[in-house]
């Protein structure tokens, strides 16, 4: 029961916060694009949004939902952003 409540709360809180995180991450990707082209370290918009979502879930599990969740996701460092395969989809709770 406790895991089910924690998972539900994670989905609800994440769904609300994605309305803030996605536009901010997309803007950060757009601002970072000229620098990425010079340094030849390409991070696609999908990888940037996935990286932001993974770290959002990890921060929620480590802070707000800490008493409820047993297993916590690990934070993804920025240097691993080009290897992120996680994608934010339209089916995520909104």
Image (spheres, rainbow, N blue to C red):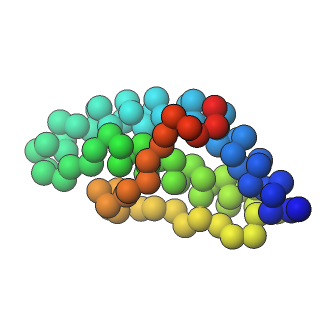
- Residue 36 is situated, as x and y percent measured from the top left of the image, at 19, 45
2 or 82, nearer to the observer: 2
* Residue 69 vertical placement versus 45 (above, below): below
Q: Judge whether residue 50 can be spotted in this image.
A: yes
Q: Give the number of callouts.
A: 0
Quadrant occupied by the N terminus: bottom right
Quadrant occupied by the C terminus: top right
Q: Judge whether residue 78 can be spotted in this image.
A: no
- Compared across the picture, whether 34 is left or right of 49 comes to left
* Residue 2 vertical placement versus 54 (above, below): below
- Compared across the picture, whether 5 is left or right of 93 comes to right
Kindly give the residue lying farthest to the front in the view shown.
91
38 or 69, nearer to the observer: 69
- Compared across the picture, whether 4 is left or right of 13 comes to right
Q: What residue is at 51 percent from the left and 34 percent from the top?
A: 90
- Residue 58 is situated, as x and y percent measured from the top left of the image, at 59, 58
- Residue 18 is situated, as x and y percent measured from the top left of the image, at 57, 36
Q: What residue is at 81 percent from the left and 58 percent from the top?
A: 4
Kindly give the residue lying farthest to the right in the view shown.
1
- Residue 32 is situated, as x and y percent measured from the top left of the image, at 27, 38
The quarter of the picture where residue 48 lies is top left
Q: What residue is at 55 percent from the left and 67 percent from the top?
A: 74
* Residue 50 vertical placement versus 71 (above, below): above
- Compared across the picture, whether 10 is left or right of 67 comes to left
């Amino acid at each position: 029961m406790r895991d089910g409540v924690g998972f539900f709360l994670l989905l609800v809180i994440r769904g609300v916060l994605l309305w803030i995180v996605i536009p901010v991450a997309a803007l950060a990707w757009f601002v970072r694009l000229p620098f990425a082209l010079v340094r030849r370290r390409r991070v696609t918009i999908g990888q940037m949004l996935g990286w932001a979502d993974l770290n959002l879930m990890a921060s929620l599990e480590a802070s707000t939902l800490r008493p409820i969740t047993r297993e916590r996701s690990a934070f993804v460092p920025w240097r691993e952003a080009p290897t992120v395969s996680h994608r934010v989809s339209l089916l995520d709770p909104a």
